[in-house]
Image (spheres, helix red, strand yellow):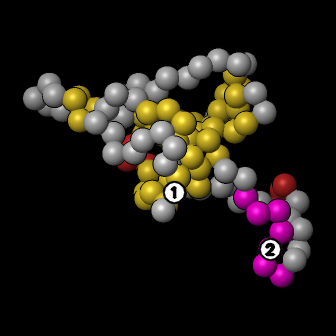
Amino acid sequence: MATLTLGAASVKPLGDRVLVKVLEQEQKTAGGIILPDTAKEKPQIGEVVAVGNGKVNDDGKRQPVDVKVGDRVFYSKYAGTDLKIGNDDYVLLSEKDILATLA
């Protein structure tokens, strides 16, 4: 999976794609051990910041995406394309790679 670094640009997902801002992961374990960057797993929780218009069905009608801007989501570990916009990390996902919304 490639990581793409962008300048200050607006990203508008197409179709059923969703742009998710990756939320920071805990810096230490429950036992208090501080984790170095190399030992951290890829985060799987993020906040939706942009949503495409939805997928076009076989009958030509557009099916809207189930998530909306502001939703916190749990997504597949190795899904999507990693993006870096400014100092923030994002993942561009297909809607099918989103496993759940978090309340």
Determine which residue is flagged by label 1: 74
Do the residues under discs 1 and 2 have CB atoms within 8 angstroms? no
Residue depicted at 44% across the width and 51% down the height:
98
SS category of the residue bearing label 1: strand
Q: Residues within 10 Å of mark 1 (few under 14, many from 20)?
A: some
Q: Which residues are magenta?
A: 25-31
Q: Nearer the viewer, residue 72 or 41?
A: 72
Task: Give the amino acid at mark 2.
Answer: Thr
Residue depicted at 16% across the width and 28% down the height:
61
Measure how far apart labels 1 and 2 are at the Cα level.
20 Å
Which circle marks residue 10 in the picture? none
Please tell me whether the stretch drawn in magenta is mainly helix, strand or loop: loop
Question: In the picture, residue 38 is in which quadrant?
Answer: bottom right
Q: Is residue 61 above or below residue 48?
A: above
Task: Give the amino acid at mark 1.
Answer: Phe
Q: Position of residue 14 (x, y in %)?
A: 41, 25
The residue at the far left in this view is 59
Question: In the picture, residue 94 is in which quadrant?
Answer: top left
- In the image, is 91 to the left or to the right of 36? left
Determine which residue is flagged by label 2: 29
- In the image, is 85 to the left or to the right of 102? right
- In the image, is 54 to the left or to the right of 39? left
Q: Position of residue 79 (x, y in %)?
A: 52, 47
Q: Position of residue 84 (x, y in %)?
A: 70, 32
Tell me how many marks there are.
2
